[in-house]
Amino acid sequence: MNVLALNFSHKGLNSISYLYFCYMKKMIERKYESVVTELMASKEINKILRDDAYVSEIIDKIKKADIIFFVAPVYAYCLPAQVPVFLDRLLAVGGNGVFADKFVAGLLTSAKIHDNIAIDDLHSLCKSIKANVCGVISLDMDLKANKDLNATLDKYLDNVFSRAFVDKEVQSVKIDNRVVVLTDSSGFDFEVRILKYLKNPPEVIYLNEKKISFCIGDLSCMFGECIYSGDDFNILFNKLESAKIVIIAYSDDRISAAMRNFFSRALSIGQHHESLPGKHIVVINKNNIPLINEWAFAYAQMQSCNLEGVITYDTTDDELYGILKSADRNSKNAFIYPETGVKLGAFKSFNEIVLMNGFVMPKDIDFLRKNKHRSILVKVYSLLNLIYKIKSVRRFFKMNVARLMIMPHKKWLSKTNSFNS
């Protein structure tokens, strides 16, 4: 098996990106018995720009490769300029279609600031060259910050190599994980395409047929219980919790009212932290609407889930099976991709704003303890949550919490001329 690594770090051998790849290279050679060829694409970009014969050699290497790794730092929230320059140069020297149907994986390094944009960038570039992306991992440029690096890379490589070599003969192996489909329309029309790859039929939840009351923002969930107990929400959410793979199927080119309402109510399960950790999410977005994809990625990140892929009308059966098989494999390996800046930034806000302002719910305390927060504030909130268990105290706060929370803000605004209420 031939593996080609294209290193787009300006620092070449002295880069964090290259250090990570050297670590991973040993795993590839040992576990997958592969021959790994390396090209310092950024360091050699001037030679690539002026030497047609050298570019032809690179094209031959790409043709011989079974898997191609793009190894790169994140610059200005996207991939370095040398990446598109490199691809355009191949095209100019007769490399049109050289990446078509090739399997591409990505290893990106950064300070975790908007690295999700760089992941999208690589997906977009691969789409333009008609390559198949079989996994992109974003790692912290501080090597010491990565927990269980060996296990993370081992599971990542297992996903990359397995997904790259899923063929039609293997598709006879049915996926036996529990799958739940959440859709906002009775016109869910992807069921037939999905069913043929599943050992057992998925449970399909049609939100438009369920009774789910609107969230009214009364904050009763701060005390561990939503005011609604007679509608369908808790039953439906429990179904998602019991699933290994969750397929979220959108029927329209927007986020429908039914979807918005369901996930708004889900805030009562975990307002400031994940409530569906470890799930493997597949999104059906028929016309590939960017807003839906962005929402799905952000939701998966905040839930500590994997967004395994987005299925559209243009997704082939091979691609669809690859996405489902990836979700199945990662679920069984308990592999969740490292968090990006989307989650890290949000959780920084949680620590700095939510804790300091006291918007802490009972289930937040469990989350904070699990993540070894030892601050005095956590202890204070733990004590307050014990006090909240007293029925009369809980009743008082449920009736007054919204007013108490808004009061200091009203006082601040009343000092300005723009507030007259």
Image (tube, rainbow, N blue to C red):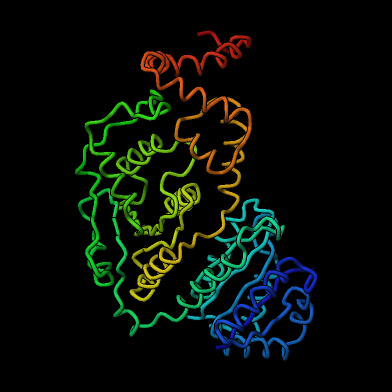
User: Could one spot residue 291 in this view of the protein?
Assistant: no
Q: Residue 340, how many percent across, how many down?
A: 58, 53
Nearest the eye: 367 or 354: 367
- Can you say whether 375 is above or below 389 in the image? below
Nearest the eye: 17 or 120: 17
Label tally: 0
- Can you say whether 185 is above or below 62 in the image? above
Residue at (70%, 67%) from the top-left corner? 17
Q: Quadrant of the rendered structure where residue 82 is?
A: bottom right
Q: Is residue 198 left or right of residue 377?
A: left
- Can you say whether 72 is above or below 170 in the image? above
Q: Residue 155, how many percent across, how many down?
A: 52, 69
Q: Quadrant of the rendered structure where residue 2 is?
A: bottom right
Q: Residue 348, how many percent across, how many down?
A: 61, 40
Q: Is residue 97 left or right of residue 55?
A: left
User: Could one spot residue 151 in this view of the protein?
Assistant: yes
Residue at (36%, 76%) from the top-left corner? 318
Q: Is residue 211 left or right of residue 293?
A: left
- Can you say whether 33 is above or below 105 in the image? below
Residue at (23%, 56%) from the top-left corner? 203
Q: Residue 283, how many percent across, how many down?
A: 38, 57
Q: Quadrant of the rendered structure where residue 83 is?
A: bottom right
Q: Quadrant of the N terminus?
A: bottom right
Q: Is residue 279 left or right of residue 18?
A: left
